Image (cartoon, coloured by chain):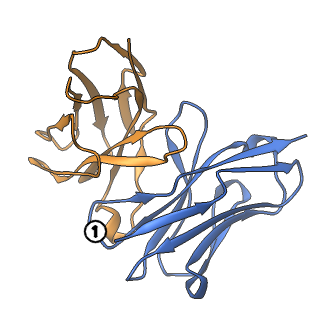
Amino acid sequence: DGGITQSPKYLFRKEGQNVTLSCEQNLNHDAMYWYRQDPGQGLRLIYYSQIVNDFQKGDIAEGYSVSREKKESFPLTVTSAQKNPTAFYLCASSMQGAARGTEAFFGQGTRLTVV
Amino acid sequence: AQSVTQLGSHVSVSEGALVLLRCNYSSSVPPYLFWYVQYPNQGLQLLLKYTSAATLVKGINGFEAEFKKSETSFHLTKPSAHMSDAAEYFCSSGGTSYGKLTFGQGTILTVHP
């Protein structure tokens, strides 16, 4: 079945450590996105990528980094510079991006907790 | 810049009652609009989308939404609530900035027996 797979589902990190969240899709989608979700704040865009080897900062990119070396994969690294990383992280993809009216498909999310 | 506003962070209805979740958008060009549903600790699932083909859009699980340009609204409705509708609902907009979706703050729907 086609879809988006995020791993792990739950992740614990010690303060000062970097951690990488995985996102893989087999939908052959061009665009991929990372969102952060906090209670009562909706979804905030961290990074997005329209094509392989290209990505753009979203609204809250500070303390995060991404790569897009393959069409199927868009990993997110939460660095030690991110002051409040505890949140639910959602990865999404779409065929041609929001401008063409296509919807985004979401993974099941990764809940990151700093201990 | 685009923005989406959902009126009411929490909505509570009785089972069998009408569900109305409100969404207003702000855009300088005709937008693409979406409603998503999220169950606890899961990703978002598309309920329906508006892409200018028809102003009344029907989605899954008996939900529908009407695009009203004069009111810049895209409210989500369902005639009769079911217990399984309890979830968080997000209105989203796209269209003016390639690759960027804008989400509202979300509305948590509670359904009482």
Which chain is mark 1 on?
B
Q: Which residue is mark 1?
A: B97
Task: Tell me where residue B75 sits by quadrant.
Answer: bottom right
Percent coordinates x, y for residue B12 in the rendering: 79, 49
Q: Colour of chain A?
A: orange
The crowd level at tag 1 (other Cα within 10 Å; few <14, some 14-19, many 20+) is some
**Which residue is painted at 22% across and 33% down in the image?**
A75
Q: Quadrant of the N terminus of chain B?
A: bottom left
> What letter labels the chain drawn in blue?
B
Front-most of residues A54 and B5? B5
Element type at mark 1: loop
Amino acid at the residue labelled 1: Ser
Q: Is B77 on the left or on the right of B102, as rendered?
A: right
Q: Where A113 falls versus A47 (above or below)?
A: above
Q: Where A28 falls versus A86 (above or below)?
A: below
Q: Is B113 on the left or on the right of A109, as rendered?
A: right
